[in-house]
Each structure stands twice: as C-alpha cells, then as structure tokens.
Amino acid sequence: MGLFDKPSKYKNTDYRSINYSGNWSRHFINEYYDSLDEIGIVETLGKLHNYKEEHLPKSLFKFCSPSSFNLSNLYNSTIYLSDPKSFNDPFDCTLNSNYELFKETYVLKRLKEDDLVDVEGGEDRISLDEYQSLVLATSSRSLSFESIFFSIKQSKQRKLARVLNSIQADAVRKYKSALEYLSSIEIGVSSFSSFKSEDELLKNTTMWSHYADHHRGFCIEYNLDFSVLKYENEMKCAIYPITYTAKNPTIPAAELLRLNHFQQDVKISKKIRKAILRTYTTKSAFWSYEKEWRIILDLNESYFQINRTIPFLKIKKIYLGCRIDHGIKKSIVNISDKMNIEVIATTKSDSSFKLQARNANVDSVNNEENNIIYQNISNITNSELGKKRMLEFFF
C-alpha cells in the first residue's frame, strides 16, 4: 500500500479497490454480463453485490421539484424510475453505433448472400476485384467506400444498379430499426448527486436551479445502507457513477448487424448489453458539476418495481430550497417530524454565491407562519384601503 493509499481489502490493481486508478465501473459492467452468461442472474447477484463496496459514497442527494408526486414519494419512502427518453440532454442515454461501418458491412454481406459477386464480374455482376476494393475501403478507412461503390454502380446495367441502391437503402432501414428496438427496452433510471459535504451541496446552486424548480423544491439526502432493503443485492449491482468524457460509447457495428430483432424470441448479445449500460452511465464532460450516480434497472426484470416506483433507502436529511413555498415547507416538516428525519432550511448568503443552512422543525415553521400572518395583517392595516375599512368598521 502506498503512502497516500486508503485501507483496502484488495490490491491497487484490482478494480474493486478504492485505490484503483482506472474506470472501475467499466470493469464491473464487463464482469457482470460475463457472469450472467456463465452462471445466471441469481448466482451473479450473490457473487458480485459487494464488488462496489469500497467505491460507494456514504450518502447520495436527490433534488426534487415541489410536486405532490415527489411529496408522495417522500412520505412513502419510494423513488420513481424515469424514462431516459424524457431527459433534458438529447445525448443522454441515446444509443449509437458506427453508422458508416454498419452500412458498409451490411452491403458487403448482402452482396455475398444475394450471389451478386463472381470472379469476372461484368455489367450484371460485381467482380471479385471490385468486391475486394470495397473490403479494403471498409478496413482501411482511408479510402471512400461510398465513392468506390458509386463508381461500380455507374459501370453496371441499370437493373443491377437499382438492386445495389436498394441494398444501401435496406442498410439504412436495418440500422435505424435495430437501434429503435434496443431503445424501446423499458429501462428505469433514478439520478442522484454525490457531495463530499453539506457545504458542497450548498455551493452547487446550479443543481438547485435545474432540478429543484429554481430553489422552490427540496433535496433529500439518503443514507447509502442497502442492508435495509429486501432486494439489497439487486440494488447494489444496479447503482453506478456517471463517467464524464468527450466521446459517447457505441454499440459495435458487427453486433448490431447480427441482431435479429424481427424474431419473436430476440437474443441480445453480451457485447450489446455491455455497450447499452456503458451508454447509460456516460455523459458529456460539461455535465460533470452534477457529480451524478444512477440507479439503472431493466423494468422487465425488476420484480420489485410497480409503475416505475420502488421502495428506497432511509432518508438522512431533507434540505429545503431557499424559495420554497411555506405550505410545502410545512408539509415536509410535518412528514419529517413523524418519520424522525432532520430538516434543514436554506437561505441566500449575503456575502457569497452559496446557501446558508439552519435547522427547521414544527415549532420554527409555526412561528414563521404566525409571523407571515402578522405581517399580512400589518400590511393590510397600513395600506390606504385597510385604513379606510378600519374607519368604516369602528365608525
């Protein structure tokens, strides 16, 4: 163990170690799907559920708008698994592959399958030399497949050219339909932020603006102890940090080409499943201020979800936005009082771009409500209309 290493059960070269310097999440995804193929879901969960243990933060924070739906989740200790198609970032969770490589590989495959290639070629067939030039363009990437294929079509009879154009069109349709099928798999995602301290939460006013309805909502801090859940192993395997990078993951073109998604019993390859999960756990580096972690579940395989809602972890604290409506604040404080949850109210700092925190409870909220009522009465009384009505009342 190095001078600055933290205590770990594993060697520094093991991705399970807190001192591992690489992308441990990527290694876990690979091992998870390899294990699924080898020993199945039950044994895999039992084997891998503690592999992330040293990387998990002690708590996670979830920003919420002040909707009745979110208040209901708070009261019932549940969370909602969102549909990724509703996310504000159009690149987020969007499945991609190498479009050009897919089309070229598809065309080469169809030329062989449809018996359109022979040694000599001619006006109604493609010669072996012409075919090899297309293969070379696909493998080298320095030559233009499209230009070579266009020249070949120009030298053929019109009937064959139409067939070749049809094959290219089929490639486009196959590419789009394959990605649409994979995107249609029902996945549920719930997003959180990982902050090292309360001060970091209070300084990140951007998150409050984007995800807590411009500070009118609230933020829940969850204690990351999965042992309180009946489905502990499933949840430990389903939680991932977001990797922030410049390039998004792609599904291998060859794997997408082999996907027979028009069959009744579709088998999705291990490589595709790995690529999908990497896509769901990768975002642009410009989103790194979110410090995001995600719960990601396949809704068709998650027996404990009902209408995209699942029971969740114990709440440690609730932070109230600095613009929260008094009625919402009172509801949250009353709910928290019954559940023995600490509530923190926030206000704007006068000296820096951060929020200030203070405890909130039933008594403080009632006192605040009395002050609001008193202030409203005072404002009415001091207004010209108020004075006139007071004179009418007494005289």
Image (cartoon, rainbow, N blue to C red):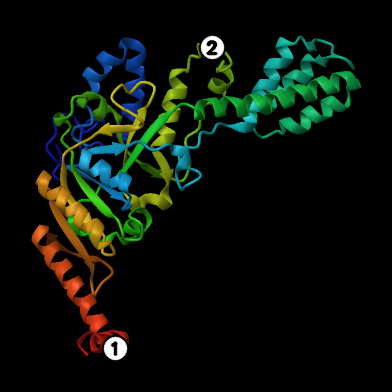
Report the amino acid beneath label 1. Lys
Quadrant location of the C terminus in the rendered image: bottom left
Percent position of residue 157, x then y: 91, 20
196 and 13: which is toward the camera: 196
Quadrant location of the N terminus in the rendered image: top left
Q: Which residue is mark 1?
A: 388
Mark seen at residue 18 = none
At mark 2, the secondary structure is: loop
Q: CA distance from mark 2 to mark 1?
A: 79 Å
Report the amino acid beneath label 2. Gln
Q: In the picture, residue 277 is in which quadrant? A: top left
The number of discs equals: 2
Mark seen at residue 264 = 2
Residue 201 appears in the figure: no
The 10 Å Cα crowd at callout 1, few under 14, some 14 to 19, many 20 or more, is few
303 and 254: which is toward the camera: 303
119 and 184: which is toward the camera: 184
Q: State the residue at coordinates (33%, 42%).
A: 191
Q: In the picture, residue 144 is in which quadrant? A: top right
Q: State the residue at coordinates (73%, 26%).
A: 169
Q: In the picture, residue 229 is in which quadrant? A: top left
Q: Is residue 333 left or right of residue 301?
A: left
N-terminal of the pair, mark 2 or mark 1, is 2
Percent position of residue 354, x then y: 25, 66
Residue 58 appears in the figure: yes
Q: State the residue at coordinates (24%, 31%).
A: 13
Percent position of residue 141, x then y: 64, 32
Q: Is residue 222 left or right of residue 116?
A: left
Q: Is residue 118 left or right of residue 202?
A: right
